Amino acid sequence: MSVTAQSVWDNCLSFIKDNIQPQAYKTWFEPIKPVKLTNKALSIQVPSKFFYEWLEEHYVKLLKVALVKELGNTARLVYIIKMENTYGNKKPFTEKIPSANRSGVRAQEIDVPIKNKSPELKNPFIIPGIRNVKIESQLNPNYNFDNFLEGDSNRLARSAGMAVANKPGGTSFNPLLIFGGVGLGKTHIAHAIGVDIKDKYPEKMVLYISAEKFTQQYIESVKKNTRNDFIHFYQLIDVLIIDDVQFFSGKSGTQDVFFHIFNHLHQNGKQVILTSDKAPVDMQDIEQRLLSRFKWGLSAELQTPDFETRVSIVKNKLYRDGVEMPNDIVEYVAKHIKSNVRELEGAIISLIAQSSFNKKEVTIELAKQVVEKFVKNTKREVSIDYIQKVVSDYFQMDVSTLQSKTRKRHIVQARQLAMFFAKKFTKASLASIGSQIGKRDHATVLHACKTVDNLSSTDKQFRKYVEDLTKKLSL
């Protein structure tokens, strides 16, 4: 029987398969294709440079034993790295691709003598805390299920989170999307799931990352032409937790790359956990194909905690801090701070600080003073819908009129003011603001903001509009 690249590689794989974990074999050896055998040199094709570096870092000894066993002591391994030109003919880099190669795929050969020491593995992009792909999960151990108190407002999300932590990738809650307003515990529960998984399954690769950081990394990978390495890195994760996924709104490149990463993880039984400030149905400027995937698993809402839950939260906070406080004061604070958990805990911290710094006893009077100041100084979150309603009411028109295509001057000015205040009072992108206010594009929003600035400085009546609306929205 003639010796071919395929037969040599098949024999190597048989040996390798017996000596590593099934998951590692599937991830790192199944994608490799034998290309040619020249004398004692076996050429194999790998998906990326990152893939090659990982093999050299972690499996060079295994490869050496397997290859020497087949081809003798003079065996050599040649890696053929397949690299895609993801931009086609519009590649924004100076490197030239031969015009004859229409597929946009080029190959780089790395001839590695089998005796060579493996090179140091470098990350394809920077994640603080990750070195040589020994992943630091970026989890905060202070956020756990023990201090995430259950109530009617969060029971579904907490129970689903615990189910996922017990069997990541093995429940129907994949992806698990947790949504709700500011300060209700989305980030807390996301960390808690990750912390619990790491405790139960220490071998699993768990990564928590904000959607904003993920986007920054993606942009950096495009600049450095390492997009494929970026994708491949995220495809290695067993449990991927992305916080504030609504940040992807209007960012088509990030959405596209996340779509491919999500598909790979989901198909391979990996767990995806997402948090958002709104339900999928209310997300603006997120591609439909991505939204449909968000709905594959479970969307669990965190609601504003009821009075009993707020009392429990306050008592738990005091217990953890080793502070005693009379029940009537606990109930007073819980009764008057209703909006979210973050504000509730903040008020308790302020009360303890006032008491200890000023050496005052914690009384109902002191609680009243702290709560009054705290509530007064806490800005209410303003939504784009709320801004449109306030502006429409001010100019005595319907929201539908404000959003319409009409070019009547007073309606155009009202629409421009709504866009201006949306940019000022929310964190939404220009594209998202435009989409929600009459399906305009980001350039229209930018023009509206400049127009409002110009008219405010030249038109006395228009300046009064701005001042009046600012007061209404700041109440």
Image (tube, rainbow, N blue to C red):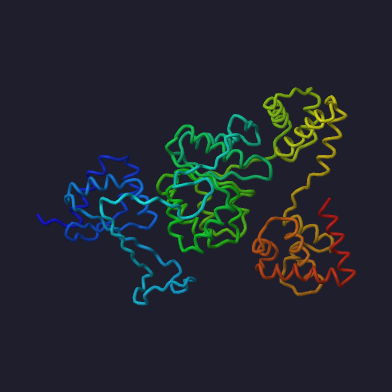
> Looking at the image, which is closer to me, 60 or 4?
60
Taking the spot 70% from the left edge, 36% from the top edge, the residue there is 305
Q: In this view of the protein, which residue sits in the foreground, 314 or 207?
A: 207
Count how many numbered circles sit on residues in the image. Answer: 0
Residue 60: x %, y % from top left: 30, 48
Judge from the rendering whether residue 463 lies leftward or rightward of residue 180; answer left or right. right
Choose between 282 and 448: the one closer to the eye: 448
Image: 66 above or below 333: below
Q: If the image is split into quadrants, where does the N terminus sit? A: bottom left
Residue 72 percent coordinates (x, y)? 16, 50
Is 139 situated left or right of 185 in this image?
A: left
Could you say which quadrant of the image residue 181 lies in? top right
Residue at 86 percent across and 61 percent down: it is: 467
Residue located farthest toward the bottom when viewing the structure as drawn:
99
Residue 53 coordinates in the image, percent (x, y): 37, 53
Q: Is residue 218 left or right of residue 79?
A: right
Residue drawn at x 49%, y 58% as measured from the top left: 257
**Viewer-proximal residue among 407 and 182:** 182
